[in-house]
Image: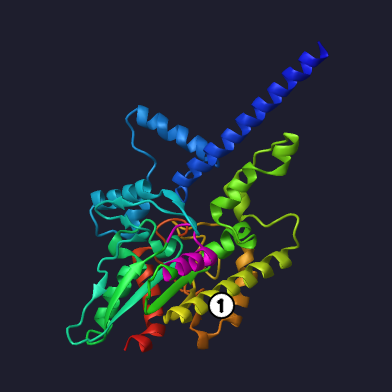
Amino acid sequence: MAANKRSSGRVILYTLILFAVLFVLIEVIFSVFFYHQHSPEKLAIVEAGKRLKGMLKGKPGSVNVENQKLVRPDSAEATNKLIAEEIDQSNKFEYEPWVEFKNVDYSGKFVNIQQAFRKTIPDAYFNPQSKDTIDIYFFGGSTIFGFNLSDEETIPSQFVKLYQQKNPSGKSIRVKNFGTPTYYSLQELMLFTNLVFKGNRPDMVVFLDGVNDFWFAKASYYNQSYFSYILRQVFSQDLLTTGKFSFKDTADRMFKDPEDIPLSQFNDTLIAHYFSNIRNAKMMADFAGAKSYFFCQPVPFYKYPNQQKDPICFKDQHTRYDYIYPIIEKRLDTSLNQFFLGNMLQNETGYPFVDGLHYSPTFSKKIVEEMLERIMKDLN
């Protein structure tokens, strides 16, 4: 009798563990689909349930179009809606060696992704008088990718257009956008390294970072990707050895300061990792014969006086940036083509963001202007 009770108890325990693991796996999968999408729900499963309910009732998914109208007032409502919908539909990933995951291929009217890079419009400027064509690769997270922007509004696309306007008699250029949502400087380094070892030899590489390195702080601290940190919780020792399981919203944990690490030590480690990744990316660029540029980007959490009045951007107060960014600005070495753009929001009163975090078409152009000012000498 006692043996039967113990056996039944094990079955119940194993069943509970199985359900817990399945729950976390499903939450992770849904988190991939709903990453960077606005929702009041903390759990992706709840958001998925709401969307399924809406679909059954014939209602469309929760796509935010109002912000698109604010930053693109001259565009037709149908255009703004389609851009938002295509970003929503294309916001998916698949496994990729080295970097763990990449964007899935997607073909739309305003959003196009093929073989890990997003379409750039225009993707080149050819000057008939130029004997050389400079190949430029752009690396970064969702801000370089151009989340909630059309193909022609992304930073790489506007780089080509602005370069042509400012330097019509300059050398020909050709651009590729390797920006990937959730990537930070370490994954970009791995992606760049993999491209080089596959035989790609760009003439110039441009990196824009700062959001994901210090916002997804837990991932950066442990030198892991956004999703590998989440998946690690599924196979934690507590769950495997004791059956104990206490689910906490994984995305929420990613952004919060740690409770078991001194805050100064945590922040200093993030800074050290960032500079280490820059040094290694420069070393790889030198190996490939490419000129490298590194830009630390503006974020809504740092020196943005209009943040609380801005109807679009996040209102969070991430004091981590108040500690990290002044150190980054002080340590960046312009002789190594490292530049700080973190102060760009100080005088902004318009709509620099298209959603809580990502840049509007207008502000993307302002970032390109800052980039070109520092890069132009090597393009002439």
Q: Residue furthest top?
A: 1
The secondary structure making up most of the magenta span is helix
Query: Residue at coordinates 70% horizontally, 26% vertically from top-left?
Result: 13
Q: Does the magenta segment cover residue 186?
A: yes
Q: Quadrant of the N terminus?
A: top right
Where does the image place residue 347, in percent across and percent down from the top left? 46, 74
Visible in this render: residue 369? yes
Q: Is residue 358 left or right of residue 305?
A: left
Residue placed most toward the observer, 279 or 324: 279
Q: Amino acid at mark 1?
A: Arg
**For residue 234, what is the image quadrant?**
top right
Q: Position of residue 263 (x, y in %)?
A: 72, 63
Q: Residue at x 48, y 66 (%)?
A: 188
The colour scheme used to paint the residues is rainbow
221 or 361: nearer the eye? 221
| Left or right: residue 202 compared with residue 95 | left
Quadrant of the rendered structure where residue 102 is? bottom left
Q: Is residue 44 left or right of residue 179?
A: right
Q: Residue furthest front?
A: 198
Give percent across and percent down for residue 281.
Answer: 51, 74
Front in this rendered view, residue 76 or 143: 143
The quadrant of the image that shows the C terminus is bottom left
User: Does residue 40 show up?
Assistant: no
Q: How many marks?
A: 1
Estimate the x, y position of residue 89 in percent, counting from the top left: 35, 46
Q: Is residue 278 magenta?
A: no
Range drawn in magenta: 180-196
Q: Residue at x 78, y 19 (%)?
A: 6
Q: Which residue is mark 1?
A: 279
Q: Tell me if residue 161 comes above or below residue 246 in the rendering.
A: below
Q: Secondary structure at mark 1?
A: helix
